[in-house]
Image: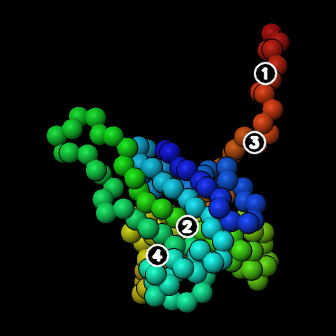
């Protein structure tokens, strides 16, 4: 599942972890593995401009999701549909830092939460009504717990060395 992460903010983020959690969420939600997702980390000024332009609200926000019009862009009679762009998740690490401090956890933990939240918005989940909020936030928590519990190989950049088996 192609997930592209670009960090255009002034704060270092774990791009591999963001891509990984997004792939995990998309997999758990049974999204077509050919779907593509873009995650962009931006500074406060750019996030503020997006927030005002698209939501009509002043100041920065933590996450915005911009879904594409349709997930499946292939023709119905196409036997081999190509990749479809799911949409864009835009994160603001500077806002995530403030929220992480207030919540008592790390910025990385906050960005995992925000990326999960953004992907759910792309998939049509919302939290405008109390019942929607309960469903979305419950699912979000379940997905984050699943991500944390999932075994992962450490990313070291070092070559993998396999020990020979002894009979």
**Image point (60%, 87%), residue name:** 59
**Mark earlier in primary sequence (1, 4):** 4
Cα separation between marks 2 and 3 = 24 Å
Looking at the rendered structure, the secondary structure element under dot 2 is strand
- 155 on left or right of 111: right
Q: Which one is in front, 3 or 46?
A: 46
Cα separation between marks 4 and 3 = 33 Å
Vertical order, 132 against 34 (above or below) = below
Cα separation between marks 3 and 1 = 16 Å
> Which residue is tagged 2?
90
Q: Which one is in front, 135 or 20?
A: 20
> Which residue is tagged 3?
155
Looking at the rendered structure, the secondary structure element under dot 1 is loop
Looking at the rendered structure, the secondary structure element under dot 4 is helix
**Image point (50%, 84%), residue name:** 52
**Mark earlier in primary sequence (4, 2):** 2
User: x%, y% of residue 96?
Assistant: 69, 74
Cα separation between marks 2 and 1 = 39 Å
- Residue 162's disc is 1
**Image point (28%, 35%), residue name:** 80
Looking at the rendered structure, the secondary structure element under dot 3 is loop
**Mark earlier in primary sequence (3, 1):** 3
Cα separation between marks 1 and 4 = 44 Å
- 100 on left or right of 32: right
> Which residue is tagged 4?
135
Asked whether residue 24 appears in the rendered view, the answer is no
């Amino acid at each position: 599942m192609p997930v592209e992460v670009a960090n255009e903010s002034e704060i270092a983020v774990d791009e591999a972890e963001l891509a990984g959690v997004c792939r995990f969420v998309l997999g758990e939600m049974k999204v077509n593995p050919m779907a593509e997702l873009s995650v962009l980390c931006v500074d406060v000024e750019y996030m503020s401009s997006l927030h005002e332009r698209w939501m009509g609200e002043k100041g920065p926000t933590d996450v915005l999701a911009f879904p594409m019009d349709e997930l499946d862009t292939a023709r119905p009679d196409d036997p081999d549909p190509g990749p479809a762009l799911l949409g864009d998740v835009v994160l603001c690490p500077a806002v995530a830092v403030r929220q992480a401090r207030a919540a008592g956890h790390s910025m990385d933990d906050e960005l995992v939460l925000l990326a999960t939240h953004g992907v759910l918005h792309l998939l049509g989940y919302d939290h405008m009504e109390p019942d929607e909020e309960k469903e979305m936030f419950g699912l979000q928590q379940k997905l984050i717990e699943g991500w944390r519990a999932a075994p992962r190989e450490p990313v070291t950049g070092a070559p993998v060395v396999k020990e020979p088996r002894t009979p």
